[in-house]
């Protein structure tokens, strides 16, 4: 565009000059030769006709745009500054204390001792299993005032189960403690004739300064021969968690009746008292007399014995 403007100006100027020269020439006297003019310089020749303005040269081809330089590698972004530490949240207000619930955390946990069960609980065990494993249970907070005495594992009498448990005491057996017994007696009769059903009578009776107790569930006698002797066993059971196992060594040869045995805590002649779980409570001490003894092919056909005024020994 600039080139075109220049060209237009130049053309106007050139035409102007040309016109003025033409005017000057027309004012010169006619017939005046150029060579007659005294000029110090050599005769100036006629100004030549102005040459035609040369064709404007073609605009040069626009050079190829240079390849765009590769963009410089983007600088690594600066490390993001560490976020400021979040301010500590204000302490949550203390929740109001919930009313104390009875201790239940240890309920049902297996245990051997009350100390394993926490406050307000104790280690409840099966009757007679004083030294064995139990389960943590809650102690009763109150009990009915009925009298159904039990002997606790502390070997003291408690009015009933509940009162024993309220003192965190387990029940040894469900009767007065045998160390308070005045005396005991044993009576047993077994008969079996031919193919008739067996017949058993008797039991073990405990006498106290209060209610008496009996073991009236009987078992058929058994024996184990040992040369001229036979070791005889009879079991007595009750509903109060106590059983008695009576043993004596009967002399078969030479045979004689009656035979008297001294029941003690050791040896072959004993009357041991047990809990239903098999723990030993103690022994009945005294004389036992066998008044009937007869054996057939299939076992005893007759057995009778009794004992009176037996004492208890732990």
Image: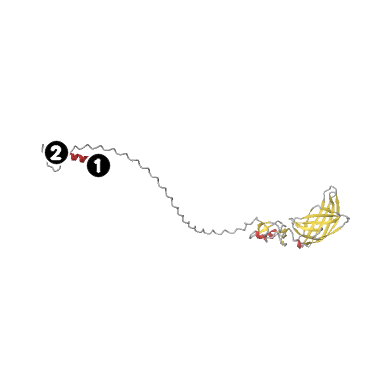
Between label 2 and label 1, give the one nearer the viewer: 2
Viewport quadrant of the C terminus: bottom right
Name which quarter of the figure residue 109 lies in: bottom right
Q: Where is residue 285 shown, x and y percent of the image?
A: 80, 61
Viewport quadrant of the N terminus: top left
Q: Residues within 10 Å of mark 1 (few under 14, many from 20)?
A: few
| Residue labelled with disc 2 | 25
Does the rendering let one see residue 139?
no
Name which quarter of the figure residue 304 lies in: bottom right
Q: Nearer the viewer, residue 107 or 231?
A: 231
Earlier sequence position, callout 2 versus callout 1:
1
Q: Where is residue 13 shown, x and y percent of the image?
A: 20, 41
Q: Where is residue 134 shown, x and y percent of the image?
A: 68, 56
| Residue labelled with disc 1 | 6
Q: Where is residue 171 shown, x and y percent of the image?
A: 71, 58
Instruction: Tell me the SS state at disc 2.
Output: helix
Pointers 2 and 1 in contact (C-beta within 8 Å): no
């Amino acid at each position: 565009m600039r080139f075109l403007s220049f060209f237009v100006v130049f053309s106007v100027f050139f035409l102007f000059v040309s016109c003025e020269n033409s005017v000057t020439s027309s004012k010169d006297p006619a017939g005046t030769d150029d060579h007659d003019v005294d000029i110090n310089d050599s005769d100036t020749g006629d100004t030549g006709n102005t040459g035609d303005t040369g064709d404007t040269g073609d605009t040069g081809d626009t050079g190829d745009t240079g390849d765009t330089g590769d963009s410089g590698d983007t600088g690594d972004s600066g490390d993001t500054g560490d976020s400021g530490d979040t301010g500590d949240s204000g302490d949550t207000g203390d929740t109001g204390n919930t009313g104390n619930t009875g201790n239940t955390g240890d309920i049902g946990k297996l245990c051997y001792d009350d100390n394993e069960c926490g406050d307000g609980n104790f280690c409840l065990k099966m009757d007679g299993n004083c030294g064995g494993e139990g389960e943590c249970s809650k102690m009763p907070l109150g009990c009915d005032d009925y009298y159904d005495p039990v002997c606790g594992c502390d070997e003291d009498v408690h009015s009933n189960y509940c009162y024993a448990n309220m003192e965190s005491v387990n029940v040894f057996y469900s009767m007065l403690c045998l160390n308070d017994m005045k005396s005991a007696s044993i009576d047993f009769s077994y008969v079996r004739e031919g193919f008739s059903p067996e017949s058993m009578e008797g039991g073990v009776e405990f006498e106290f300064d209060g209610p008496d107790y009996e073991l009236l569930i009987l078992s058929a006698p058994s024996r184990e021969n040992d040369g001229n002797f036979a070791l005889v066993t009879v079991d007595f059971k009750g509903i109060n968690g106590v059983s008695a196992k009576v043993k004596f060594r009967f002399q078969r040869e030479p045979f004689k009746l009656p035979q008297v045995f001294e029941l003690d805590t050791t040896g072959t002649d004993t009357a041991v008292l047990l809990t239903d779980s098999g723990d030993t409570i103690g022994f009945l001490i005294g004389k036992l007399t066998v008044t009937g003894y007869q054996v057939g092919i299939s076992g005893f056909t007759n057995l009778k014995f009794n004992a009176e005024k037996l004492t208890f020994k732990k």
